[in-house]
Image (spheres, rainbow, N blue to C red):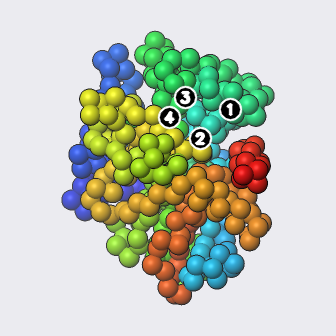
Amino acid sequence: MSNTNAVNTTIYKYHPDQDGFYGPFGGAYIPEMLHANVAELQEVYLSIIQEPGFKQEFDELLRDYVGRPSPLYLAKKLSAKYNANIYLKREDLNHTGAHKINNTIGQILLAKRLKKKRIIAETGAGQHGVATATVCALMGLECFVYMGAVDIERQAPNVARMKMLGATVIPAVSGSKTLKDATNEAIRDWINNAENTHYIIGSAIGPHPYPDMVTRFQSVISEEIKWQLQQKTGKDHPDYLVACVGGGSNAAGAFYHYLHDDRVQLILAEAAGLGIDSGESAATSILGTEGIIHGCMTLLMQTDDGQIVEPYSLSAGLDYPGIGPMHAHLITSKRAKVHAATDDEAMQAVIELSKEEGIIPALETAHALAILDRLDLSKEDNVVVCLSGRGDKDLNTFITYLEERNGK
Ligand SMILES: *Cc1c(COP(=O)(O)O)cnc(C)c1O
């Protein structure tokens, strides 16, 4: 974690101001009933997470429980193929299989210091639910995970995992019965149990201070990339830094220590689904317009009269209708560039990494690999791709996809 002062916006223009605004995006647009809870978090989060005792406990758990530092691996065959040095930041090797555990460890330590007894979370594919149930088991706190009824059907193995870990999984049966609805129900629970409950949000989204708090917990990714690259290349920065983006937490963590370093090109990979113009897409920043979702002003997919458009992606971790406010700012101010990969392109990238490097990536992660051929790379370029998670959870999706393709 960095000790950078979050309010010094003249120098650190990509950090939020005191009210959680990244340019026009961010803020805290919340119902009155949540005001006390959110205001408490806003007041104390920085002092708590910068306290030496907190940092020590966080660092120890990341090392001994999560397995950090995660390796930075030079993928030789990919490098030859794309004509550049392609390094993979191996978040897939973390306990529970993705970067999400970095954030849930941080937030459970915060919840303990706030003396909360009860944890709630929302989950789409179940990865954040599993990461939350894991840290609740570790710390002995009660855990309730809201999950769309449709997702409960689709993601049975993760539901089983959460139950094994002692969590209660509550089906969200309103609306489309997916992530957005699960988030709405989690917020309703928080309103009703504000006193004793901490809400662990799973991405760099939600009302201030969540986007900044989650980003700081995930920033361990770029903290490690810096010294690992220094050791391997003699330079502490890459030329390109690439990450997939759903809500934006793995990208935010991978970018954090390079946000104000102009030598680094920041590249985001969105899910185009069946194609950006197909009507079945989750390319939020490309298709999105300014609006408020789940407590913050950001870019989101909506109709002219402000109804949220259902996103689509084969990968459950990327089909969120909005994008974190930090990314909305990075994109609109042209600090970061976005490319979108379709389901098919992502599946090709899954197959390629599996066969070429012996690493089966998560379907979300594969979107970051799928856009490498759009970058104007040359032999000396160092590229870091955030390998956000492993593909074990997606095996059924992979198998069904390959069977359908072979059947055609
Ligand atoms: C959840 C998830 C994502 C998307 O979430 P971000 O907050 O955008 O990082 C990406 N990759 C994996 C493996 C995930 O589990």
The residue labelled by disc 4 is 201
Q: Ligand 1 near label 2 (Cβ, under 8 Å)?
A: no
The residue labelled by disc 1 is 154
Q: Is residue 333 above or below residue 209?
A: below
Circles 1, 2 touching at the beta carbon (< 8 Å): yes
Give the residue displayed 24% in from the left and 50% down from the top: 23
Q: Name the amino acid type tagged 2.
A: Ala
Q: What secondary structure is marked by label 3?
A: loop
- Residue 27: image x %, image y %? 29, 37
Circles 4, 1 touching at the beta carbon (< 8 Å): no
Give the residue displayed 67% in from the left and 20% down from the top: 168
Circles 4, 2 touching at the beta carbon (< 8 Å): no
- Residue 338: image x %, image y %? 41, 60
Distance of label 1 from label 2 (alpha carbons)? 9 Å
Give the residue displayed 60% in from the left and 45% down from the top: 315
Q: Which mark is residue 316?
A: 2
